[in-house]
Amino acid sequence: MKTSHLQVTELTCVDSLFTQLVELLGACINDGASLGFYKPAQTDLLQQYWHRTNNELRLKQRHLYAILSDDTVLACVQLVPCYKQNGTHRAEIEKLLVHPKAQRQGLARKLMQFLEQQTIVQGFRLLVLDTQTGDKSELFYQALNYQKSGEIPNFVSDAGGQFNATSYYYKVLSQPLSSLLSPS
């Protein structure tokens, strides 16, 4: 599959793609990604998750960016702005998902670059995220210049009761050129 022509789009609700998003999340979990759910993925829990996410999208409490090919979701990522008065300059990245059949084609990088461009335009200056320590995603985030700030031991568990650490990453974003040129 060629991915150079694929565009990232923002989804404001997931109604028409609900089944695909449930399948995408389940495929990533069953492929070994630590995304807040145990393997094997349970469809009813994934459906509940996407219903909650859809409500937050409608309330504009969350942003969802996706890459589609012929109305098929290949990948997506979420951005959750901080609504605390002293934290409106930051947002959290959640659930970067690339379907296992579409991995290693640059989709995650494309999504993250788009997300960073959008966040700068929206006025965010700090992005944060977490991922399971030792997961392949750590190298990916490091390659995108995210800085590891630390680990929390025993943060998540697997279906067998084994505990794993979580690593936290951040990236300070540069200001857009237009804000540097505007008079103070």
Image (spheres, rainbow, N blue to C red):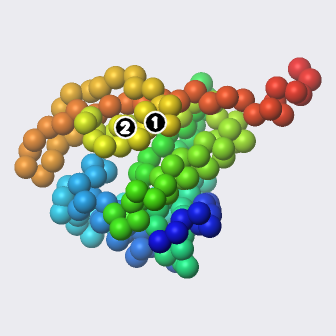
Q: Amino acid at mark 1?
A: Ala
In the picture shown, does residue 62 fall above or below 175? below
Outermost residue to the left: 160
Q: Mark 1–mark 2 contact, CB under 8 Å?
A: yes
Outermost residue to the right: 183
Expressed as whole percent of the image width and height from the top left, the position of residue 164 reads 18, 36
In the picture shown, does residue 180 fall above or below 28? above
> Residue at the spot x=54%, y=62% of the render?
66
Expressed as whole percent of the image width and height from the top left, the position of residue 60 reads 61, 53
State the SS at label 2.
helix
Q: Which residue carries the number 2 mark?
A: 139
> Residue at the spot x=88%, y=27% of the render?
181
Expressed as whole percent of the image width and height from the top left, the position of residue 154 reads 18, 32
Q: Is residue 68 left or right of residue 165?
A: right
State the SS at label 1.
helix
Q: What whole-number distance in Å separates the C-alpha atoms at marks 1 and 2?
A: 6 Å
Residue 143: numbered disc: 1
Q: Is residue 5 left or right of residue 181?
A: left
